[in-house]
Image (spheres, rainbow, N blue to C red):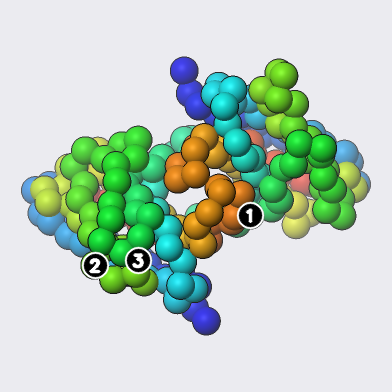
Amino acid sequence: RKEVEQDPGPFNVPEGATVAFNCTYSNSASQSFFWYRQDCRKEPKLLMSVYSSGNEDGRFTAQLNRASQYISLLIRDSKLSDSATYLCVVNNNFNKFYFGSGTKLNVKP
Amino acid sequence: NAGVTQTPKFRVLKTGQSMTLLCAQDMNHEYMYWYRQDPGMGLRLIHYSVGEGTTAKGEVPDGYNVSRLKKQNFLLGLESAAPSQTSVYFCASRVAGTGTDTQYFGPGTRLTVL
């Protein structure tokens, strides 16, 4: 079983829409959680960390559900520039990080 | 402050050839990582290092070797390249600590093995 699983999409949404992605993880002892953004043929960049109480950064909201072992990312008022692949990342010990295969988002005019 | 840099950016090898990928960071980070990314798949950890002179295996270490002789550099070697090693290779570094700190990635090396 994969450590981290994501719906690959693509999610095709119009500008201004709200879109949500989920990600599930298999190790209940996982300690820290992140969303990264990856543009085509570029390196991943941190979008936001995910905290137990949930956290928000502008139009982006991340939630963690430890009981069901999933994390979510909500994007409000989508912009064309949000088009990218969103990677869910989980840390199971201090040293190793496990990446999901990514969810592709296309925001259309 | 260049962050994380990788050399080369592109490379084409023939089966059986060897090469070394260089990762350099100027942020004084303790931890460094090598990942590979294949189409439709997430990044998979090849090897990592928690400090100068130390290395450890990740998820997919076979066919690769690494060295961390200097804190700022992390080298990934392919002794005898195979077509299955065609991939995009990313290096990353982070400060250290509890696992909550950010990984910073280099721009990647696109390797094709014919």
| Most distant residue in the front direction | B97
Foreground residue, A70 or A107? A70
The answer to whether mark 2 and mark 1 are in CB contact below 8 A is no
Say whether marks 2 and 3 touch (CB < 8 Å): no
Question: Callout 3, which amino acid?
Answer: Cys
Q: Residues within 10 Å of mark 2 (few under 14, many from 20)?
A: few
For residue B59, which quarter of the picture?
top left
Residue A76, percent from left and from top: 88, 44
Q: CA distance from mark 2 to mark 1?
A: 28 Å
In the image, residue B29 sits, relative to residue A67, either above or below, namely: below
Residues marked 2 and 1, same chain: no
Residue B40 at x, y = what percent?
A: 48, 35
Q: Secondary structure at mark 2?
A: loop
Question: Which residue lies at the image location 23% right of the left edge and 55% below the top edge?
Answer: B66
Identify the disc placed on residue A46: 1
Q: Is residue B2 visible?
A: yes
The chain ID associated with circle 3 is B
Q: Amino acid at mark 1?
A: Leu
Which of discs 2 and 3 lies nearer the camera? The answer is: 2
At label 1, counting other C-alpha atoms closer than 10 Å, the crowd grade (few under 14, some 14-19, many 20 or more) is some
Location of mark 2 (residue)? B69
Q: Alpha carbon of mark 2 to alpha carbon of mark 3: how far?
A: 12 Å
Where does label 3 land, which residue? B23
Of all chains, the one bearing label 2 is B
Q: Is residue A75 visible?
A: no
Residue displayed at 63% across by 25% down: A24
Looking at the image, residue A56 sits to the left or right of residue B33; the answer is right
- The percent position of residue B49, horizontal first and vertical second, equals 34, 54
Residue A61 falls left or right of residue A29: right
Q: Secondary structure at mark 1?
A: strand
Q: CA distance from mark 1 to mark 3?
A: 19 Å
